[in-house]
Image (cartoon, rainbow, N blue to C red):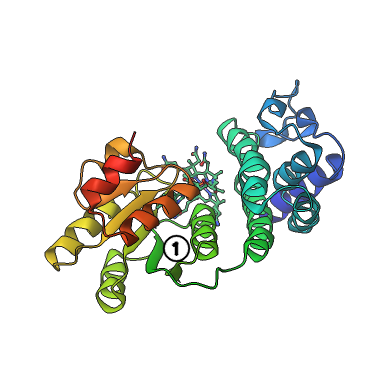
Amino acid sequence: MVSSAIELSAKRRQLAPATAKVDFSLIFRKYGAPRKEALPYDYILPAEPELVRVARAVINGNPLEAEDAVKIALGKFDPLTVISEGLTKGMNVVSRMWDDGVYFLPEVVNSADAMQAGVKICEEKMGRAAERKGRIIAHVAEGDIHDIGKNIVVALLRANGFEVIDLGRDVPVRTVVETAKRERPIAIMGTALMTTTMTAFPRLAGELKREGLEILLACGGGAVNQEFVETFEGSAFGDKAADAVKIAELALQGLSWREIRGRVHK
Ligand code: B12
């Protein structure tokens, strides 16, 4: 099973080298059946060639290719643009291919690795601001291992001068609460990509309240939306990684979670 998955990935890479246009019709489908027609994914890709190259490296699931492409793109674009218009656009194509049954877990793992490699280069380029504005805890919800978005959020917060305690992924609610008690952050950032794990956020908000900790819980990630976040107190929703910085700045000014919602919710 595993070896055939590796073979499939190798074959795909051979069929779709870094610089070539990805011919989706050649990518093997479930049970080895080739697709008859190319799927129209190219419309998701960005217009600029440097960013297309970044996106294709993610689609190809090749970390080395992603690092090279990102370094080139950074010569022309700022790190945030490379993340949002290059790496993320590539991951959007991967998501569609997963939804359509073209890519399976091994391919998505490779693509995630490629994206992480690219994000790391962007993070290095963004650096860390010299000033220390305030302390933030970041984590991925209990039971959830999707950490790419959280890593982008952490990189942006650090680049904007916040001190971030990164608890990583699949973090038990209790660990977040204990860390908050000890570290007294100005806000907690939570990421959830699954409908089964986003429920950790209302539990976390409830436990923070029970412990008498008035700390904003900012929630984001693919599974989460504003409507859901508004069902529990003490929280605010952010759609994009840049919203995490906006929310952190407002928390730093001492605004309450209600006031922050008023500023960032649509
Ligand atoms: C990559 C990926 C994986 C990788 C994850 C690698 C990694 N290190 O993260 C791997 C292959 C390991 C994986 C595994 C699984 N996955 Co997966 N995966 C994806 C995929 C394709 C992309 C996710 C991603 O990284 N997006 C890009 C990032 C940048 O987006 P993001 O996290 O949302 O972050 C952005 C914003 O939301 C925001 N943001 C993020 N956090 C925060 C926080 C705050 C405070 C703010 C303000 C903003 C913010 O900033 C980011 C940039 O703007 C999605 C498909 C999709 N459509 O999302 C499925 C998806 C999330 N996976 C899914 C599933 C089911 C799984 C598995 C259970 C599969 C399996 N059968 O094993 C496992 C999960 C195991 C587990 N316990 O978690 C489902 C979830 C479905 C659901 N309704 O719950 C999805 C939606 C695919 C699908 N359509 O079925 N997956």
Determine whether, in the image, residue 107 is placed left or right of residue 209: right
Residue 144, image x, y percentages: 42, 56
Residue 134 position by quadrant: bottom left
Residue 96, image x, y percentages: 59, 33
Determine whether, in the image, residue 152 is placed left or right of residue 238: right
Which of the pair 83/135 is nearer the observer? 135
Which of the pair 151/13 is nearer the observer? 151
Which of the pair 80/64 is nearer the observer? 80
Mark 1 surroundings within 10 Å by alpha-carbon count, few (fewer than 14), some (14 through 19), many (20 or more): many
User: Where's the C terminus, which quadrant?
Assistant: top left
**Residue receiving disc 1:** 169
Instruction: Name the secondary structure under disc 1.
Output: loop
- Please determine whether, in this image, residue 53 is positioned above or below residue 64: above
Residue 38, image x, y percentages: 75, 24
Residue at (44% x, 54% y) in the render: 245
Residue at (43% x, 42% y) in the render: 239
Label 1 CB-ligand 1 distance < 8 A: yes
Residue 180, image x, y percentages: 28, 71
Residue 169 position by quadrant: bottom left
